[in-house]
Amino acid sequence: MSQDFDVIVIGGGPAGYPCAIRAAQNKLKVACIDEWQNRDGSYAFGGTCLNAGCIPSKALLESTELFHRAQTEFAAHGITVGAVQMDVAAMQARKAKIVKGSTMGILALFKSAGVTALQGHGKLLKGNRVEFIGRDGAKQELIAKHVVLASGSTPMALPSVPFDNDRVVDSWGALEFAAVPKKLGVIGAGVIGLELGSVWRRLGAEVVVLEALDTFLPMADAAVAKEALRHFQKQGLDIRLGAKVTGCEKSKDGVLLQFADAKGNQSVVVEKVVVAIGRRPYTAELLGEGAGVELDARGFIKVDHDCRTGAANVWAIGDVVRGPMLAHKGKEEGVVVADLIAGKVGEVNYDLIPSVIYTAPEIAWVGKTEEQVKQAGGAYKVGTFPFLASGRARAMEAANGFCKIVADKDSDEILGVHIIGPMAGELIAEAVLAMEYSASTEDLQRTMHAHPTLSEAMHEAALNADKLAIDIPNR
Ligand code: FAD
Ligand code: AMP
């Protein structure tokens, strides 16, 4: 292998691998180094997202949602089935097959794009040299004109409830349970905690979610968060807000979780615990002496708006830099950096990063919440449309939630779109595109939406912003 490259990307997750592919599309000579190892010791590209995050969680959410719907909705359709059973091993095998297919797919993409895939550890040394230790332990020094750091993140530990990879697990562990725990404690009511809690709740686990903050989903529009909490509680998720976990005691019966809430010190005994209190940037053994890359106080690699670090021709992208820890944010950064390296133009629009929570109902938003717009002080208007009034949602037996649009009262520009309801994560793409083009509610009002589709909710919400909705009384 020649040791000189135009670009070396360290990290082959959803930030790193798209960066490598785009750099190769830009006719650069590229290598991507990744050290991800699965529990069976096998190496796999794709990082957290494909191996232990986005993809396996969505596979389990799909299986368990179908299981739940078979139990609760089939009768309404007139479908009679016997007792519905879940074979957890088969569900996990399906998930593993999806993950394997996706991660192998990256190797195929690298091959077709001409990216050199290197499995092992990469470390940035002084002067754009990279130390690579391969799977066989052999060490070699590579040189690149540009190095892109995409080393991702790792779950945050809670010192008072240490991981033991058996009864106290991180999100990866909670995706791998071989049986449904009788009672599951989830620490943290963030996106990951809610998705994993939903998976095991749907399969019959009693789930208690302990969240230190008093506010539920503080990053979401308050109306959406309120509606979500109502649904999750109805589904049996026991969500305790203002409950800060302070410690645990393990016994043969399970784990006693200690927490403090407004009433004082409390405890709950559970069979398994998922610690889902957030993730931290991962830079272990990444930066050699004099590499010239700085970390901020929270351990993120310091970068400018265009993902340049302080070291010449060294860039950093994805979860290891500031901004929301989301796969699509990392992917956009990777593609833009590869274009900037090639002398092209590109910029990530950090104001329009969509957020999706893949629960049922699904939750998705982009732009500013009503609370943020109100706080900014300008005049604004709101249009909403409930899925109860959507023919398609009713036909799907999924007429929950609503679509809400917040727009500037004077210019009519859309400032934020917030959806809770069926396929919210798919519907939000229209809002992202509209806002990318600085659309007004009138633009959406004058855009024809097929009938009957869920997307009509967006159309009607835009109309409702001017009290012109057709399918609901305008208020
Ligand atoms: P990572 O995916 O963490 O990849 C980094 C890679 O670099 C890893 O393979 C790592 O082994 C490798 N690496 C690190 N250091 C080195 C080194 N020195 N040498 C060689 N290799 C190295 N995001 C979404 O957008 N949608 C979702 O639905 C979603 N669901 C999630 C569900 C769960 C349970 C979790 C945990 C996360 C989820 N995320 C989701 C977040 C998403 O997984 C991350 O934002 C994304 O993986 C970040 O991509 P990345 O490439 O920056 O880092
Ligand atoms: P996120 O950062 O979105 O993944 O969410 C993690 C959640 O965990 C946040 O809402 C935190 O408030 C919550 N959290 C952090 N530490 C604790 C703790 N000790 N007990 C309960 N919740 C916690």
Image (cartoon, rainbow, N blue to C red):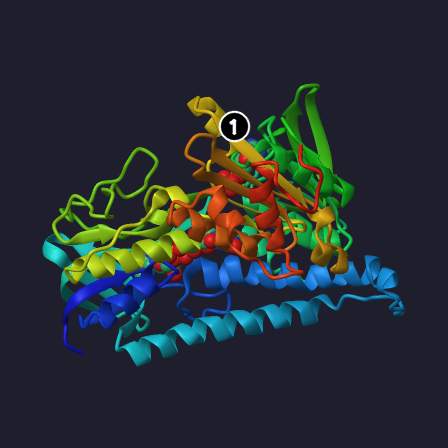
Q: In the orientation shown, which residue stands out farthest toward the top?
A: 263
Tell me which corner region of the image, top left, top right, bottom left or bottom right, holds residue 475: top right
Q: Is residue 262 above or below residue 85?
A: above
| Ligand 2 under 8 Å from disc 1 Cβ | no
Name the residue located 72 percent from the left edge and 42 percent from the top edge: 231
Amino acid marked by disc 1: Glu
Residue annotated with mark 1: 371
Q: Is residue 398 above or below residue 214?
A: below
| Residue situated in front as seen by the camera: 273 or 404 | 404
The image shows residue 362 at horizontal and vertical percentages of 62, 50
Q: Could one spot residue 168 in this view of the protein?
A: no
Q: Could one spot residue 321 in this view of the protein?
A: yes
| Residue situated in front as seen by the camera: 102 or 127 | 102
The image shows residue 323 at horizontal and vertical percentages of 37, 42
Q: How many marks?
A: 1
Name the residue located 45 percent from the left edge and 36 percent from the top edge: 412
Q: Residues within 10 Å of mark 1 (few under 14, many from 20)?
A: few
Q: On the rendering, which quadrant does ligand 2 occupy?
A: top right
Q: Is residue 88 above or below residue 123?
A: below
- Viewport quadrant of the N terminus: bottom left
Name the residue located 20 percent from the left edge and 62 percent from the top edge: 131
Residue 448 in the figure: left or right of residue 346: right
Q: Secondary structure at mark 1?
A: helix
